[in-house]
């Protein structure tokens, strides 16, 4: 609990703001009039029961879905309809609920791919390799090695990620998102399917990322204990509508949230 | 412990990410290159040139090209034969229009022209994937061959509808035409293949190669990390077609000398190159060479053994050859679905541990 109170002091300006987002697939309304913001330097959680529209929300932010109504503001500017790779170039990185690593590539190559938006040498220099292409490669390799150190995955540097166990793959995926040095990091259930120890490690990484690199994080998570401990502010969705928004203590005691999500029955 | 990295320490990232991390490998590769450049040209004869070395080099180039597209970027293509035809006809038109042009320039320009055509036929890949893309590229194969048959401008209105390569030179030495010496044609192709194999390696290990592999392995994640699918796929089509176009130009101008599109660049050539890439190893530069060697050199070896060694009739040998090659392809794919390159990788791992099993 003390973590979230400490963090409150150093959150800065609004980094991302969604205004009145409405998204529907045919007759199904996935999101209805959702507005919330993410402030620089904070850890923002999005929670809600299955099918509440959490992942749809992330998909809207990262440009996979284009909402019928509403606006997304990023770093004080309104964002037009964007392709996901354009969103990535603006400085948004994310991980997926089911791991989406490049299975044929090594851990190192996966992380280097994370730095794609920062690499610029043209094809002719790359064909020659010696010179600018190699210099750039080595420059980015150093940053990637820092992340490898940070995540403690030195031993699997050259292993194809398809061969790694699940928890390690999750960690590599986090590393790939981290390698982008993004302004905003979206984590879609970073702890799904992990055991207690792996969860603790992951929490530590998320907090350290936030502390050391100052990364702003928006995460979806089902483990309510984790969410309440990690996050500075929580937004709760249910059936595509926003139920509550605020610091964990307030959200925890909100009757609507308790009814919808936290598992206390209506009768009590 | 025959083949090991113990004692071969890396102290910089540059040393860590070199192509051949082991000293033994580096020596071996330099040795092979020195042999190919300094020894073979003095002993090459017409038979070795025409039956073994030239076809191997030309088809290696084609396999490299297709491997970039299919192995690295994951886009299945059956248009290889058609793209080789583009390279061949481009080189023909260039050779006729600019007789004093250096053949290296002709071949590379033919590659560039093919790259343009490749981008055009690569456009469907932005919408369709997998087998459906293969069918779309099949259209390229049939359309291009039809085009070169139908439009007389491409074969300069020759009565036979064939194109034949006039004698052209590199620094005063003839490399095309009937009078070109064996060592010259061999060295010409060798230089192109070695240089562009190095280029392929560089492209695939850097930013561009990773964007291709990202698209191949998980296109959604690739996009989220900042890879533009349009750029990645079209650049793969362009560079792949560039290589295939060069191989087509080499095949026609240096190796065959004359060509007729239906026969020389038919659909069977598309399949041949695809099989090379699959048997050799998708997503491996070495695999392209191994696949080409297997499908080009092995039949020659079998023929020599059966006709030359056992004295069997040539037609029987030709048929048995097909049976054997087909059987071996199946065997390889059952034993090691990832191709000969993976087989070699596993062998290396085993050698490193030898004599211990684990």
Image: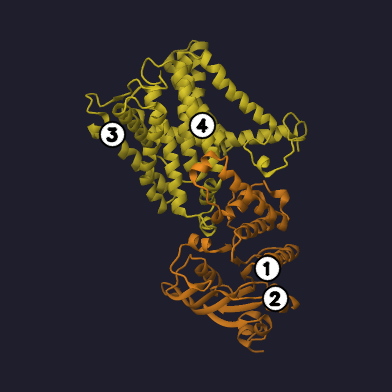
**Is label 2 in a helix, a strand or a loop?**
helix
Q: CA distance from mark 3 to mark 1?
A: 62 Å
Q: Residue at label 2? A: A7
Q: Are marks 2 and 1 in contact (CB under 8 Å)?
A: yes
Residue at the spot of label 1: A210
- Please tell me the colour of chain B: yellow
Give the spatial CA distance, label 2 vs label 1: 10 Å
Q: Quadrant of the C terminus of chain A?
A: bottom right
Tag 2–tag 3 contact (CB < 8 Å):
no
Question: Cα distance, mark 4 to mark 3?
Answer: 30 Å
Residue at 31 percent of width and 35 percent of height: B145
Q: Colour of chain A?
A: orange
Circles 3, 1 touching at the beta carbon (< 8 Å): no
Residue B116 in the image: state x and y as whole percent. 37, 42
Q: Specify whether disc 4 shares its chain with disc 2.
A: no
* Residue mark closest to the camera, 4 vs 3: 4
């Amino acid at each position: 609990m003390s973590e979230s109170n400490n963090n409150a002091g150093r959150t800065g300006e609004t980094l991302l703001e969604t205004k009145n987002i409405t998204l529907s697939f045919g007759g199904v309304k996935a999101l209805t009039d959702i507005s919330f913001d993410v402030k620089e330097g904070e850890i923002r959680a999005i929670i809600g029961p299955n099918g509440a529209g959490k992942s749809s929300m992330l998909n809207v932010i990262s440009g996979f879905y284009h909402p019928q109504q509403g606006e997304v503001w990023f770093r004080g500017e309104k964002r037009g309809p964007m392709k996901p790779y354009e969103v990535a170039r603006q400085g948004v990185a994310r991980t997926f609920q089911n791991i989406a690593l490049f299975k044929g590539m090594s851990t190192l190559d996966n992380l280097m791919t994370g730095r794609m938006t920062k690499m610029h040498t043209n094809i002719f220099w790359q064909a020659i390799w010696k010179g600018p292409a190699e210099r750039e490669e080595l420059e980015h390799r150093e940053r990637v090695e820092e992340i490898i150190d940070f995540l403690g995955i030195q031993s699997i540097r050259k292993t194809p990620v398809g061969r790694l166990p699940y928890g390690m793959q999750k960690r590599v995926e986090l590393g790939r998102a981290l390698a982008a040095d993004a302004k905003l990091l979206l984590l879609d259930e970073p702890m799904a399917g992990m055991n207690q120890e792996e969860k603790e490690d992951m929490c530590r990484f998320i907090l350290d990322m936030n502390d050391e690199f100052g990364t702003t994080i928006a995460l979806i998570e089902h483990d309510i204990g984790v969410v309440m401990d990690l996050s500075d502010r929580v937004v709760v969705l249910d059936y595509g509508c926003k139920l509550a928004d605020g610091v964990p203590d307030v959200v925890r005691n909100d009757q609507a949230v308790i009814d919808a999500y936290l598992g206390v029955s209506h009768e009590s | 412990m025959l083949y090991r990295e113990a004692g071969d320490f890396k102290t910089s990232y540059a040393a860590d990410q070199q192509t051949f991390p082991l000293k033994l490998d580096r020596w071996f590769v330099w040795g092979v290159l020195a042999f190919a450049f300094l020894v073979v040209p003095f002993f090459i004869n017409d038979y070795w040139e025409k039956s073994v070395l030239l076809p191997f080099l030309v088809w290696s180039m084609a396999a490299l090209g297709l491997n970039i597209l299919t192995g690295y970027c994951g886009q299945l293509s059956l248009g290889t034969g058609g793209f080789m035809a583009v390279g061949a006809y481009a080189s023909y038109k260039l050779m006729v229009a600019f007789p004093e042009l250096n053949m290296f320039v002709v071949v590379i320009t033919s590659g560039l022209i093919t790259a343009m055509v490749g981008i055009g036929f690569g456009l469907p890949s932005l919408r369709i994937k997998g087998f459906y893309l293969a069918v779309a590229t099949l259209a390229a194969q049939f359309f291009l061959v039809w085009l070169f048959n139908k439009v007389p401008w491409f074969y300069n209105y020759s009565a036979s509808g064939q194109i034949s390569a006039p004698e052209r030179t590199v620094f005063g030495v003839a490399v095309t035409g009937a009078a070109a010496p064996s060592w010259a044609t061999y060295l010409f192709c060798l230089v192109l293949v070695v240089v562009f194999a190095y280029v392929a390696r560089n492209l695939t290990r850097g930013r561009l190669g990773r964007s291709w592999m990202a698209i191949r392995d998980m296109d959604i994640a690739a996009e989220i990390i900042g890879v533009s699918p349009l750029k990645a796929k079209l650049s793969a089509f362009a560079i792949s077609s560039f290589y295939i176009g060069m191989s087509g130009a080499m095949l026609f101008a240096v190796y065959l000398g004359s060509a007729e599109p239906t026969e020389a660049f038919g659909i069977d050539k598309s399949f041949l190159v695809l099989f090379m890439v699959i048997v050799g190893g998708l997503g491996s530069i070495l695999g392209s060479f191994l696949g080409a060697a297997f499908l080009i050199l092995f039949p020659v070896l079998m023929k020599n053994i059966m006709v030359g060694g056992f004295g069997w009739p040539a037609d029987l040998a030709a048929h048995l050859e097909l049976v054997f090659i087909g059987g071996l392809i199946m065997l390889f794919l059952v034993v090691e679905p990832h191709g000969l390159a993976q087989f070699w990788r596993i062998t290396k791992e085993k050698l490193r541990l030898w004599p211990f099993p684990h």
